[in-house]
Amino acid sequence: MLKNRIIPCLDVKNGRVVKGINFVDLQDAGDPVEQAKIYSDGGADEICFLDITASNENRNTIYDVVERTSRKCFVPLTVGGGVRSIEDINKLLNCGADKVSINTAAVQNSKVVEESSKKFGSQCIVVAIDAKQKDDKWEIFTHGGRNNTGIDAIEYAKKMEDSGAGELLVTSMDRDGTQVGYDIKLMSKISSMVNIPVIASGGVGNLDHLVDGIKLGNASAVLAASIFHYGKHSVKEAKEYLDSKGIPVRI
Amino acid sequence: MNVTIVDYNSGNISSVINSFKEVAKDKVNLDVTSDLNKIKSSDKVVLPGQGSFKSCVDALNNISGLVDTLNEFAIKNKKPLLGICVGLQMFADIGYEETETKGLGWISGKVSKINNQNGKYKLPHIGWNQINIVKESKIFKGIENNSHMYFVHSYEFIPEDKNAISAITDYSSNIVCSVEKENIFGTQFHPEKSDKTGLKIIDNFINL
């Protein structure tokens, strides 16, 4: 039986973790590689890096991070943030990323998704959708949630599936950082519209939110950042909790 | 010992390279190449594959003499070869992804799309699933039945010779996820991404 996945996400800026696990036994708490290794040893089903490096001159730091991580972690590694072109995707994959998530570039030009999924295979193309509720609809935001495009999120999700995306990483901008739980309506709506797996993101504050994302949001995988940071919950705890609620997980 | 990972522009193989490097350490000389002489003189060959069946077969055929060299290695000389994902699928006679495409024909059978029962099952089949070991296979030495492996695929290999099947996994139906026929081994899942159990399979192959 296929298991639901738990994916811890690390924000990386200039090659360093922004919010981290903060374990005392870490030699270098800011090193994404060390934190990724702790996650994968703890049973994370995948690891996700979100590169939030703002300046162009420091962009290359993520390649070094990915390269070092992929030599130590033998679970799938997804990298997103600032991915603009086929060349960017190619570089990340060559460094050892298994999947690349594309956000703004996919909204601006869906050909990036079409061409990259053809060239590298759908299995490594994740389209990240940042959506915000407006009345009874959701609209797509780009540039890290700063720009409203007015595009309908549900229709866009379908379009990305048709363009060759292998998975959708759906983040509710209303919930992101709030710790009040995923936007379940958004997740379940998109999940029922597409035939590719949906990864729920944005808003996790406790372990029940992970359960809801899967049971009510019909997500195939749940992504979370802050609940795994600062040792609030370990990935192992999260999995045992999901298991106790009857959700199939890899333990 | 020399192990060669065949680099035939089949997409992203860096994870395969990293996992073999991790397992091989200094015991094994690891090459990543499409050089025919290197492959010929190798003790073992790994055939990865990502993307579509057609794109991988095309990429193999694009390198002059590569298919002949692989045939000589695996069929004539019967040296150990491990196919991963589409690398395994290419063992088939024929694949139906994109368009009908001839495979290597090493294990008779076809590769067709997983029946998702009208959308009941999401495709690709992505994530960790358990393998049901149906026959003893040398690469499963020390691997417990029902171990979790990482899968990413939408197409499945359906061999005619059921004796070649070494493990199956349950996703909409029983999907063949590992084969062993004499010196030819294949996994539909990704041992290079399946954490410690996956690395154990790679170790088993290297130590054959």
Image (cartoon, rainbow, N blue to C red):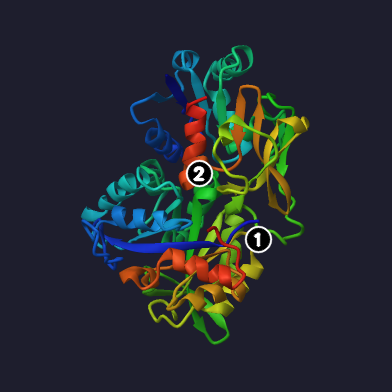
Mark 2, secondary structure of its residue: helix
Q: Chain letter of disc 2? A: B
Q: Amino acid at mark 1?
A: Asn
Residue A84, x across and y down, in percent: 39, 55
Dot 2 and dot 1 within a common chain: no
- Image depth: mark 2 or mark 1 in front: 2
Residue B62, x across and y down, in percent: 54, 24
Mark 1, secondary structure of its residue: loop
Residue nearer the viewer, A91 or A115: A91
- Res B197 label: 2
Residue A38, x across and y down, in percent: 35, 57
Residue located beneath label 1 in the image: A195
- Badge 2: residue crowd in 10 Å (few <14, some 14–19, many ≥20): some
Corner quadrant of residue B30:
top left
Q: Amino acid at mark 2?
A: Thr
Residue positioned 29% across, 50% down in the render: A65
Task: Identify the residue at the far bottom of this view.
Answer: A135
Quadrant in which the N terminus of chain B is drawn: top left
Q: Is residue A150 visible?
A: no
Vertical arrangement, residue A80 with respect to residue B73, above or below:
below
- Total numbered labels placed on residues in the image: 2
Q: Is residue A99 visible?
A: yes
- Badge 1: residue crowd in 10 Å (few <14, some 14–19, many ≥20): many
Residue B191, x across and y down, in percent: 52, 41
- Res A224 label: none
Q: Tell whether B69 sits left or right of A101.
A: right
Residue positioned 35% across, 45% down in the render: A72
Residue positioned 65% across, 58% down in the render: B122
